[in-house]
Image (cartoon, rainbow, N blue to C red):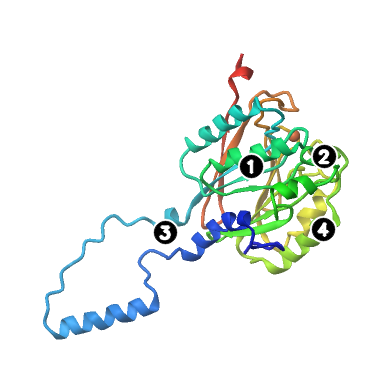
Amino acid sequence: MIQTAARNCKFALFCLAPIKQAADMKLPGRAAPSSRRSFLRNLSLSIAAGSLVRPVRLGAQTPAASVNRFRFLVVNDIHHVSPECTPFMEALVLHMQEQGPVDFCLNVGDLADLGARESLVAVRDIFAALGAPVYPVPGNHDCDVGENTDLYSEIFPDRLNYSFAHRGWQFIGLDSTDGNKWNETRVGDAALSFLDTAARDLDRKAPTVLFTHFPMATDVRWASLSGADVLSRLDDLNLRCAFSGHFHARTERTHGRAAVLTNTCCSRVRGPHDDTTAEGYLVCTAHPDGRLDRVFIPYKPAEKQA
Ligand SMILES: [Fe+2]
């Protein structure tokens, strides 16, 4: 259920993969009605014919909870700026793959450090090697060229304000940029009206995740001035978590029963904006009951470890 205008582009099809996966998913032990009728008819015929019905060994049954559980990555503020960043990010993707299978990755803004086309293209191509769909939102640095999202949208079509469903969960990516301003920013009208549409049209019971570049918790440094407004517009949904970056530091607040987070950066050329030094990304596990486990995975390039 991608809610964007252009659904037929190649990129959108790529990112529809998990939705198709969800649509194709069948609960264990449940056959389609036609198959069930066929099975019962054949069983009746077998018994009537006196044929031997052998016990079938089903093997180890996987609990439904683990079948429906899924994992995804969240990374922010990777700040690609020059060709030297490419091997760093390729190693980052390898490091992510070593954490085990994931269904997708949220890339939460500041993909590029100066917003250059070469950097945005490099990030797109490097993360394509992850082997899972990547869902980005723009950061302020991704808007440095032209002070708008035009170049970002050219390279990442339909990835400003959008939503997708995955295994009973809903994810909302929101453009929280305000030109290329880094402070005292407000979410634009297009994003706010998209939120209102999402709040009206999405499943109110399904656990929901919001991801934005600018922090939404109002007391976090350099948070969006629209944070309280954005979160309140989602109060009718079952919001469980909001992921953000920009502050390059780990913070955690709450809004209702939702965790409202920022994570540190994961960059060759930038560092945390608080007094910490650890950098890394999150591996998240989403449970069918709406719980969301998060594990911080430290990652730091060799040149920063000295
Ligand atoms: Fe950043």
**Sequence-first disc among 1 and 2:** 1
User: Contact, CB < 8 Å: mark 2 with mark 3?
Assistant: no
Residue in view at x 78 percent, y 59 percent: 233
User: Contact, CB < 8 Å: mark 4 with mark 3?
Assistant: no
Please provide percent x and percent y for residue 128.
Answer: 57, 43
Residue in view at x 55 percent, y 29 percent: 91
Q: Residue under label 1, please give it.
A: 124
Front: mark 4 or 1: 1
- Classify the position of ligand 1 by quadrant: top left, top right, bottom left or bottom right: top right
Residue type (three-letter) at the residue carrying disc 3: Ala
Residue type (three-letter) at the residue carrying disc 2: Val
CA distance for labels 1 and 2: 17 Å
Q: Secondary structure at mark 4?
A: helix
Front position in the image: 271 or 65: 271
Please provide percent x and percent y for residue 74.
Answer: 61, 42
Q: Residue under label 2, please give it.
A: 145
Q: Secondary structure at mark 1?
A: helix
Q: Residue under label 3, please give it.
A: 64
